[in-house]
Image (cartoon, coloured by chain):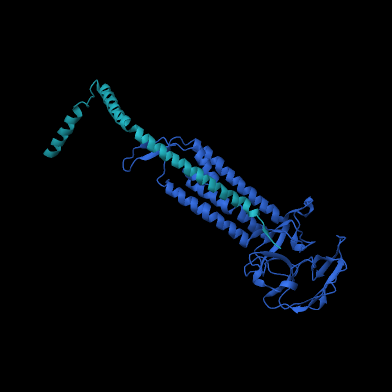
């Protein structure tokens, strides 16, 4: 009985207290922090950007080469499959 | 090629969001129908497109053709080719259109260059060539005749389809007298001959004064509708099968009576004076009889295309 009364009092005190309120300048502070972080990561990126660009460019070049070469081989095989059926062997 | 951003995921590493290139998708489907769909992440569609292209067009049309009357062989082969081209074009266009709408696409875990390479090798470089070989060896194969050994039935410049499901335990057709057979050249085993089966195992074959005698009975002869100034042409009939033969005018052909050995057949060319057949090369083992001439699909001579020969049914000639 005493324990129940103590729990009820605790719950009552929580219900009577106000919800937490954000500070008035909360939005401004968050945006400033985002901007600061963006600028610092942009500075890092600008130092590494030329190397990453050339590597990416090289990978893309190889990918295009693979697609082009594979397409040539593949299309040859496909046309051979479709039209090669009509290639006639000679009978004497 | 890619504009990538990462998508945060609570429990797994972030997966890349990419933009799919329509050109790459179309090129991939052009190189292997269904491949572009794989690039676009449509695994089920990719599989079905490939299955339909590889097996439900040319191979199925060839198989169906053997169950239907011989005159339908050429139309069905044409249909198979048209269907294959249609599926191919559909795969290319569909891959292009789908990729255009995949601006912010999440790459699947299985979409790796290694998978693409394996699929390409298995489907394009292994499966399709094997299917081609299988269709030509066991179903339907095209042949062309550079010689006139089977004239007037089959002329030099004729292109024909042969039923390769012939002369085997589970084949659709068995060897019968009068069949125009495709057989292996006994002297050059990489080359084929085309001759008519005249004598079956155990038969007695004789030619006397240009007349064919099978088991002592003379074939029946009738005047041919097509006469030629340099050749005598007649209709030769044995049993319920009739065909046309020719020999040079005023030339007499004799061949002594011979018994066809077990497991062998006796073959003759319809152009009796210009045929390297069993009279010269001997009896042919049944195992070397590979195909049954079915239908002419094209014919040309020095004078041009012989339109009247296209579509001729060789199973009744």
- Relative horizontal placement of residue A69, taking residue B207 as reference (left or right): left
* Residue in the foreground of this view, choosing between B189 and B238: B189
Question: Residue B199, relative to residue B97: is it above or below?
Answer: below
Image coordinates for residue B104, horizontal then vertical, percent:
43, 35
Which residue is situated farthest in the left direction here?
A: A2
Q: Quadrant of the N terminus of chain B?
A: top left
Question: Residue A26, relative to residue A68: is it above or below?
Answer: above
Image coordinates for residue B156, horizontal then vertical, percent:
75, 58
* Residue in the foreground of this view, choosing between B37 and B152: B152
Say which residue appears at 48% left-offset and 45% top-offset.
Answer: B38
- Relative horizontal placement of residue B247, taking residue B197 as reference (left or right): right
The mark tally for this picture is: 0
Image coordinates for residue B268, horizontal then vertical, percent:
76, 69
Say which residue appears at 18% left-offset and 33% top-offset.
Answer: A11
- Relative horizontal placement of residue B188, taking residue A26 as reference (left or right): right
- Relative horizontal placement of residue B150, taking residue A50 as reference (left or right): right
* Residue in the foreground of this view, choosing between B8 and B225: B225
Image coordinates for residue B232, horizontal then vertical, percent:
86, 65
**Does any portion of residue B98 appear in the rendered image?**
no
Question: Residue B203, relative to residue B154: is it above or below?
Answer: below
Figure chain in cyan: A
* Chain B shade in the render: blue
Q: Quadrant of the C terminus of chain B?
A: bottom right
* Residue in the foreground of this view, choosing between B171 and A23: B171
Q: Quadrant of residue B74?
A: bottom right
Say which residue appears at 49% left-offset and 50% top-offset.
Answer: B120
**Does any portion of residue B255 appear in the rendered image?**
yes
Q: Quadrant of residue A10?
A: top left
Say which residue appears at 74% left-offset and 62% top-offset.
Answer: B315
């Amino acid at each position: 009985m005493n324990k129940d009364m103590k729990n009820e009092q605790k719950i009552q005190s929580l219900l009577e207290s106000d919800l937490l309120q954000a500070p008035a300048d909360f939005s401004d502070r968050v945006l400033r922090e985002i901007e600061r972080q963006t600028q610092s990561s942009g500075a890092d990126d600008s130092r590494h950007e030329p190397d990453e660009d050339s590597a990416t460019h090289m990978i893309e070049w190889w990918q295009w080469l693979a697609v082009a070469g594979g397409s040539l081989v593949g299309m040859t095989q496909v046309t051979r499959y479709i039209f090669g059926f009509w290639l006639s062997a000679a009978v004497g | 090629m890619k504009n990538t951003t990462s998508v945060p995921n609570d429990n797994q590493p972030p997966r890349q969001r990419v933009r799919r290139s329509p050109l790459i998708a179309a090129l991939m489907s052009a190189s292997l129908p269904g491949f572009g769909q794989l690039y676009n992440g449509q695994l089920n569609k990719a599989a079905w497109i490939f299955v339909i292209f590889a097996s439900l067009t040319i191979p199925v049309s060839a198989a169906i053709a053997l169950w239907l009357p011989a005159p339908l062989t050429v139309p069905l082969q044409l249909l198979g080719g048209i269907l294959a081209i249609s599926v191919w074009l559909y795969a290319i266009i569909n891959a292009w259109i789908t990729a255009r709408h995949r601006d912010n696409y999440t790459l699947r875990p299985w979409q790796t260059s290694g998978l693409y390479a394996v699929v390409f090798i298995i489907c394009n470089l292994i499966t399709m060539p094997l299917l081609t070989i299988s269709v030509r060896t066991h179903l339907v194969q095209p042949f062309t005749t550079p010689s006139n050994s089977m004239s007037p039935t089959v002329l030099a410049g004729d292109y024909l389809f042969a039923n390769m499901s012939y002369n085997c335990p589970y084949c659709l057709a068995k060897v019968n007298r009068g069949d125009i057979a495709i057989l292996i050249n006994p002297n050059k085993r990489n080359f084929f001959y085309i001759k008519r089966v005249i004598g079956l195992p155990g038969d007695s074959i004789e030619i006397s004064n240009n007349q064919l005698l099978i088991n002592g009975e003379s074939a029946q002869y009738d005047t041919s509708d097509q006469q030629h100034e340099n050749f005598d042409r007649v209709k030769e009939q044995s049993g319920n099968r009739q065909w046309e033969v020719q020999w040079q005018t005023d030339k007499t052909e004799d061949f002594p009576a011979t018994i066809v050995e077990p497991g062998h057949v006796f073959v003759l060319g319809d152009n009796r004076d210009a045929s390297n057949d069993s009279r010269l090369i001997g009896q042919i083992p049944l195992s070397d009889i590979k195909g049954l001439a079915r239908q002419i699909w094209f014919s040309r001579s020095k004078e041009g295309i012989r339109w009247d020969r296209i579509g001729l049914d060789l199973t009744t000639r």
